[in-house]
Amino acid sequence: MKLHHPPSLPFLLLATVLIHLSAITFSTAAATVPTANNTDFIRASCGTTLYPELCYTSLSGYANVVRQDPARLARVAIGVSLSKARLMASYVSNLSRQADYGSDHRAASVLHDCHTVFGDAIDGITGSLQQMRQLGGSPEALRFQVSNVQTYLSAALTNEDTCTDGFDDVPDCPVKSDVSGRVVKVKKVTSNALALVNSYASKVTNP
Ligand SMILES: *[C@@H]1O[C@H](CO)[C@@H](O)[C@H](O)[C@H]1NC(C)=O
Ligand SMILES: *[C@@H]1O[C@H](CO)[C@@H](O)[C@H](O)[C@H]1NC(C)=O
């Protein structure tokens, strides 16, 4: 048996393949571990919204899904806003079924209206998300699609406002403060999603 046998060609090839494979493994791992930059990107983007802290806390968990892509960030923000609106619709629907408002028909009727307008808000947010998932084509087509997203989301924000406005004529009571307080939070999340769509839109329209 020779002691100083040079490495065979198959061995060298195998070693090269293994080194490349481990490099691939490392870069995949790096993409799934939160990096400062992915999180910084969310922080910086949230700085353009009206409620930056709420924006950051509700979206930073998606930093590695977003991966510093403003379109993906807008989609994620719309998705979060959709789930909040769905929760709110379910909450007011439960309230109006469970509670006994006695002689206060106004609160009961406002809750019913809130359920209806939150249904409309959900339709709008769903529409904006569908449009956001189908972006592409010429620059004009893209501008048109993004303006659809903005229109859908603004309409949803108006629907959410309508729920709050309904309570204007209702005397102060626990259900009024509870529902109004919750709607304020949902509106902030929707407003932030719209702001992130707007900043994506400004990147698309003035590249
Ligand atoms: C973040 O990005 C900057 C510039 O793009 C780069 O210089 C820096 O090394 C990155 N930091 C991390 C932690 O990836
Ligand atoms: C509404 O009621 C259903 C059934 O009781 C419950 O599963 C759901 O969690 C409630 N939704 C909210 C938002 O409280």
Image (spheres, rainbow, N blue to C red):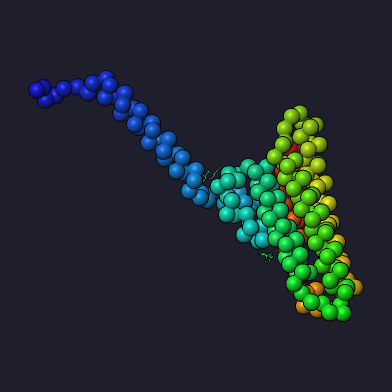
Q: Residue furthest top?
A: 9
Query: Could you tell me which residue is drawn at 81 percent across and 54 percent down?
Result: 120
The answer to whether residue 79 is left or right of residue 1 is right
In the rendered image, the quadrant that contains the C terminus is: top right
The answer to whether residue 37 is left or right of residue 109 is left
Q: Residue furthest left?
A: 1
Query: Could you tell me which residue is drawn at 83 percent across and 58 percent down?
Result: 117
Is residue 18 positioned above or below 126 on the image?
above
Q: Position of residue 39 (x, y in %)?
A: 57, 51
Q: Position of residue 177 (x, y in %)?
A: 78, 74
Choose between 165 and 34: the one closer to the eye. 165
Q: Position of residue 80 (x, y in %)?
A: 67, 54
Choose between 97 and 179: the one closer to the eye. 97
Query: Could you tell me which residue is drawn at 35 percent across and 28 percent down?
Result: 17
Residue 90 visible here: yes
In the rendered image, the quadrant that contains the N terminus is: top left
Counting every numbered tag in the picture gives 0
Kindly indicate the quadrant of the structure image that contains residue 179.
Answer: bottom right
Residue 47 visible here: no
Q: Position of residue 191 (x, y in %)?
A: 76, 56
Kindly indicate the quadrant of the structure image that contains residue 98.
Answer: bottom right
The answer to whether residue 70 is left or right of residue 22 is right
Kindly indicate the quadrant of the structure image that contains residue 6.
Answer: top left
Query: Could you tell me which residue is drawn at 72 percent across and 36 percent down?
Result: 135
